Image (cartoon, rainbow, N blue to C red):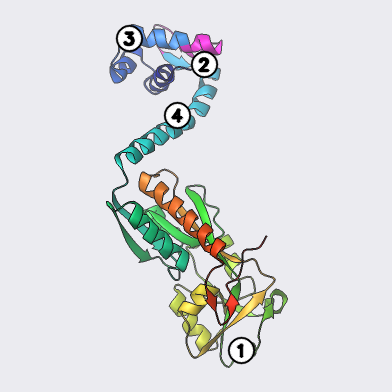
Amino acid sequence: MEIRELECFLVLAEELHFGRAGERLYVSQSRVSQLLRSLEGRIGARLVERTSRRVRLTPLGERFLTGLRPAYDALSATVQDAKAAARGVEGTLRVGFQGAADEVLMRALDAFHRAYPACSTEVSEIPLRDPFGAVRGGGVDVAAVLLPVAEEDLVLGPVFSQQRQTLAVSVRHRFAGRASLSAAELADEPLIRVSAPAPEYWIEAHAPGAPGPEVATLQEGLTLVAAGRGAMLLCGPTAEYHGRRDIVFVPVGGLPDSVLGLVWRRDAPTARITAFAAALASADSQGRADGGPWKDGRKRHEPRR
């Protein structure tokens, strides 16, 4: 395939006029006709019908356009990304996170700074109740969010920090003295959950027990936990970071591990994002190879095999 023929067809499909298509492509009208005939010859059928009054796509042309446009856009984006990478990663990368910036994320930021000193980073916490809003709205370029992620307009990059879940309960709660819990024991336990705009599937994944109070932020949730209004599921690192004397964190078995993933807008890939995603994947791989940090004589929870 000749890329110029494909470009000619795409422009002609938009303009439906050979003269205007030639102006946009900076070629003559006859050259547009020549490129179109060549493309149709490769395919073996007419893509465009032309009369003295109008230009329109054939049914095959319409079908060809539907498949060609996203493929051509993806190819163009890849070329532009490669050009940016060739010029070097520079500028500013804005990184969002939920809950706490964990060890893997901080290790990735450090490696990114050392590899790309011309690119600065800005790190900010994003609302627990809105894991994807900051990325969609342009507040951050990438965000480390809790899985699951099932958003068609977002790319899920490397996943990292797979951790066992813990249940945050008041020191007065009936589970406070337990060494561990099973998932079955949470079935009737009111679990604090975040409110919209988080998607319902995301909310349910992080509060699989009986519906409890709704909160907007992690601190609101911990406050209700301390007041005995409900319990809240948190990953190990977040529990450690937000430890307080009036709350106990009890490990829970039988639940899917808590996992973070890096997300960004599908229509906005950049060399900075690509480079940071690679740094994050490398940091997580190195952390798993090292066995992770040790605390109280116990190894950090290993990823499930």
- The verdict on residue 235 being magenta is no
**Three-letter code for the amino acid on which mark 1 is drawn:** Ala
Please determine whether, in this image, residue 165 is positioned above or below residue 115: below
- Disc 2 crowd rating (10 Å Cα; few below 14, some 14-19, many 20+) is some
Tag 1–tag 4 contact (CB < 8 Å): no
**Three-letter code for the amino acid on which mark 2 is drawn:** Thr
- Closer mark to the observer between disc 4 and disc 2: 4
Tag 1–tag 3 contact (CB < 8 Å): no
Q: How far apart are the two marked residues, 1 and 4, measured between alpha carbons? A: 58 Å
Lower sequence index among marks 1 and 3? 3
Lower sequence index among marks 4 and 2? 2
Please determine whether, in this image, residue 251 is positioned above or below residue 23: below
- Closer mark to the observer between disc 3 and disc 4: 4
- Closer mark to the observer between disc 3 and disc 2: 3
Q: How far apart are the two marked residues, 3 and 4, measured between alpha carbons? A: 23 Å
Circle 4 is placed at which residue position?
72
- Disc 1 crowd rating (10 Å Cα; few below 14, some 14-19, many 20+) is some
- The verdict on residue 47 being magenta is yes
Q: How far apart are the two marked residues, 1 and 2, measured between alpha carbons? A: 70 Å
Can residue 199 be seen in the rendering of this structure?
no
Tag 3–tag 4 contact (CB < 8 Å): no
Q: How far apart are the two marked residues, 3 and 2, measured between alpha carbons? A: 20 Å
Circle 1 is placed at which residue position?
176
Give the magenta part as a residue range: 39-54
Residue at image coords 37%, 11%: 32
- Closer mark to the observer between disc 1 and disc 3: 1
